């Protein structure tokens, strides 16, 4: 089993979808699920073997650094497995949820988005990273505007303009690096990074981090996020919040830690993370639109993850990766469970969801589980993640870090305030007047929507109760990111 | 003078990128913004090409016996630029089609008038 299949098979399937659509109307909807199931099986099969030694895939028989190569380390395969799991569940959800518009195009673009994300986490070549990044970005611009309504098109345009500028900055950074080192292999650049003056390297790093930071939704660059995540169809919101911004964050982290090894730059990242967290949570608190609230909450969670990465100790990076997984699962669950609530009531106002627990008990329960997990209550997956980050910050032993983590926890309190308010509304407030009569729909979401939501909720509970399932893999993944020398040695084979 | 001759093309590339950035940031007409994005792309492509260019260089083909490797133009940036052009064209096509849809909804392309979504 070669990790290249994780990219090649879904990519091939994505382009088969338009052909299948000529033969059958129903078939295209199931193709993404098949592709992602394949990816999930392959990545789980590869995961134990890459823990000891990453698999380096050569293309055209040239050894790195002269070819485009994939580096399937513990981090890459772990994230590929996360992408495949969330992608599979959302694909099942979309079989029933996406009815209007050009359905085959939706599924083809959806699969391309996931191919882009998988490629980002597996590639070892800087320009290849850019190409996969663009695949991810272009398909997500198109999917945000999929329904073609006013809000969707407007936010797709915003997202496209900001994303295109971000990608251009990335390309300038890559051009600088190629001019300096004459290679595009991340391992080769990382090995020679200290051979040139720091200021010349810093220019390219600023370009790369700013460019990837747009997709990773780091604070001053994230104006597109609340619009894009809230105007997209709910299945796409789930993927954008759960997967796409994580792929951007992976690119930032890989460039910062592996390519540059920029320890002196990390306190700045730490502060940016804290700002992102506070701005995201404060804005979420004041929202009345449920999807915008969830989008801002994603921003806040990304801030916490960036904060943990900025601490840059082994324990904090483990915590950050744990949070990447936990936020990916929980936010996907929240968007999926809220999708049919919005569909049934026809409104995104939080007040229209009052009393939902009577009409849609399973969806409401799933929403509550996702919300509690994000806040970080103990039996759910969010708790070990936040706990690891707080412990890592306190282990630093500096009063400054204690103050910073206290500010970060303040963000969590705000988060708790708005999530508990929604859950209280779902369970204990009376339904708005005439809501049931008007729509005539007290019905629960269909099976194709409940199955993925319940699987996600179960995963959140199981990993929350025994976090060892995940920590066994998160540890090696963190050292994959931090241990630059080992990465270079594995890739270049010296 | 040789410094200027060696580096003047980089100045040109970045001037083009800056003009594009200025257009994106300042103009409120969506079509102009898209043109600005395209200018940035073009500037970056020129930058990449000039990073690998050798004056009076030859094509990197090893068929003839008399070829000197030191005189060959680096082919990698050219491959990168081909890819970047394709990506730029697809972003451009998507942006223009979104602009058509946006005009259908609002009857204007003035970005100052299109602001239903706010923080």
Image: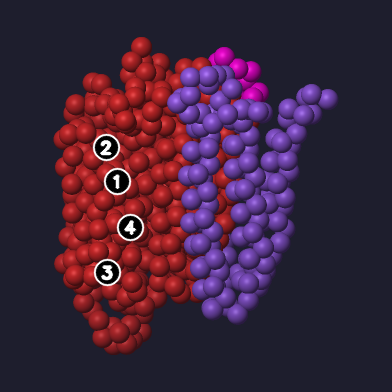
**Mark 1 or 2 closer to N-term?**
2
Q: For residue A332, what is the image quadrant? A: bottom left
**Mark 1 or 4 closer to N-term?**
1
Q: Which mark is residue A110?
A: 4
Q: Measure how far apart labels 2 and 3 are at the Cα level.
A: 31 Å
In the rendering, at what x and y percent does residue A477 appear? 32, 28
Which scheme is used to colour this image of the protein? by chain
In the structure shown, which secondary structural element does the residue marked by tag 4 occupy?
helix
Q: Which residues are magenta?
A: A193-202
Q: Measure how far apart labels 4 and 3 are at the Cα level.
A: 14 Å
Query: Chain A, which colour?
Result: red
In the rendering, at what x and y percent does residue B26 appear? 72, 58
Q: Measure how far apart labels 1 and 4 are at the Cα level.
A: 12 Å
Horizontal placement of B88 versus A448: left or right? right
B110 w.r.t. A31: above or below: below
Q: Are marks 2 and 4 in contact (CB under 8 Å)?
A: no
The overriding secondary structure of the stretch rendered in magenta is helix
- Residue linked to disc 3: A97
Q: Measure how far apart labels 3 and 1 are at the Cα level.
A: 20 Å
Residue at x 79% of width, y 29% of height:
B4
Q: Are marks 1 and 4 in contact (CB under 8 Å)?
A: no
- Residue linked to disc 1: A83
Query: Chain B, which colour?
Result: purple
**Mark 4 or 3 closer to N-term?**
3
- Residue linked to disc 2: A4
In the structure shown, which secondary structural element does the residue marked by tag 1 occupy?
helix
Q: For residue A272, what is the image quadrant? A: top right
**Quadrant that contains the C terminus of chain A:** top left
Nearer the observer, A176 or A395? A176
């Amino acid at each position: 089993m070669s990790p290249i299949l994780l990219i090649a098979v879904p990519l091939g399937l994505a382009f088969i979808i338009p052909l299948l659509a000529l033969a059958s109307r129903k078939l295209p909807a199931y193709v993404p699920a098949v592709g992602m199931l394949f990816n999930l099986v392959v990545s789980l099969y590869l995961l134990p073997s890459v823990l000891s030694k990453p698999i380096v895939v050569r293309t055209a028989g040239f050894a790195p650094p002269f070819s485009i190569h994939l580096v399937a380390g513990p981090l890459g395969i772990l994230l590929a497995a996360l992408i495949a799991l969330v992608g599979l569940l959302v694909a099942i959800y979309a079989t029933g949820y996406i009815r209007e518009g050009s359905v085959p195009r939706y599924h083809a673009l959806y699969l391309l988005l996931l191919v882009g994300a998988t490629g980002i986490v597996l590639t070892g070549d800087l320009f290849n990273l850019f190409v996969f990044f663009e695949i991810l970005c272009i398909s997500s611009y198109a999917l945000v505007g999929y329904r073609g309504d006013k809000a969707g098109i407007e936010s797709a345009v915003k997202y496209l303009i900001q994303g295109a500028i971000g990608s251009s900055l990335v390309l300038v950074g890559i051009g600088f690096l190629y001019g300096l080192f004459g290679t595009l292999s991340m391992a080769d650049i990382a090995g020679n990074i200290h051979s040139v003056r720091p200021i010349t390297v810093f220019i390219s790093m600023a370009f790369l981090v700013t460019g990837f930071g747009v997709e990773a939704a780091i604070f001053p660059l994230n104006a597109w996020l609340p619009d894009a995540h809230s105007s997209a169809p709910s299945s796409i919101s789930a993927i954008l919040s759960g997967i796409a911004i994580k792929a951007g964050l992976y690119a930032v982290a890989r460039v910062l830690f592996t390519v540059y090894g920029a320890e002196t730059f990390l306190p700045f990242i730490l502060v940016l993370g804290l700002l992102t967290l506070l701005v995201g949570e404060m804005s979420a608190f004041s929202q009345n639109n449920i999807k915008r609230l969830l989008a801002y909450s994603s921003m806040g969670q990304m801030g916490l993850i960036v904060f943990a990465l900025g601490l840059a100790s082994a324990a904090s990076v483990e915590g950050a990766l744990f949070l990447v997984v936990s936020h990916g699962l929980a936010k996907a669950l929240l968007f999926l469970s809220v999708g049919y609530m919005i569909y049934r009531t026809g409104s995104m106002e939080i007040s229209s969801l009052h009393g939902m627990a009577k009409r849609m008990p399973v969806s409401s329960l799933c929403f509550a589980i996702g919300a509690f997990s994000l806040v970080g209550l103990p039996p759910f997956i969010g708790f070990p993640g936040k706990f690891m980050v707080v412990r890592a910050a306190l282990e630093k032993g500096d009063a400054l870090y204690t103050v910073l983590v206290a500010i970060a926890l303040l963000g969590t309190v705000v988060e708790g305030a708005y999530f508990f308010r929604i859950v209280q509304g779902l369970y204990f407030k009376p339904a708005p007047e005439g809501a049931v009569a008007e729509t005539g729909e007290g019905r629960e979401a269909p099976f194709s929507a409940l199955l993925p939501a319940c699987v996600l909720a179960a995963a959140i509970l199981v990993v929350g109760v025994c976090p060892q399932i995940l920590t066994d893999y998160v540890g090696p993944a963190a050292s994959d990111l931090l241990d630059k020398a080992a990465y270079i040695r594995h890739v270049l084979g010296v | 003078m040789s410094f200027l001759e060696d580096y003047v093309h980089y100045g040109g590339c970045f001037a083009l990128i800056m003009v594009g950035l200025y257009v994106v940031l300042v103009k409120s007409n969506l079509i102009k913004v898209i043109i600005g994005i395209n200018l940035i792309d073009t500037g970056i492509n020129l930058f990449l090409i000039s990073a690998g260019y050798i004056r009076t260089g030859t094509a990197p083909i090893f068929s003839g016996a008399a070829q000197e490797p030191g005189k060959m133009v680096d082919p990698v940036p050219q491959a990168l630029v081909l890819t970047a052009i394709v990506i730029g064209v697809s972003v451009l096509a998507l942006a223009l089609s979104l602009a058509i849809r946006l005009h259908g909804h609002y009857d204007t392309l003035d970005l100052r008038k299109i602001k239903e979504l706010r923080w």
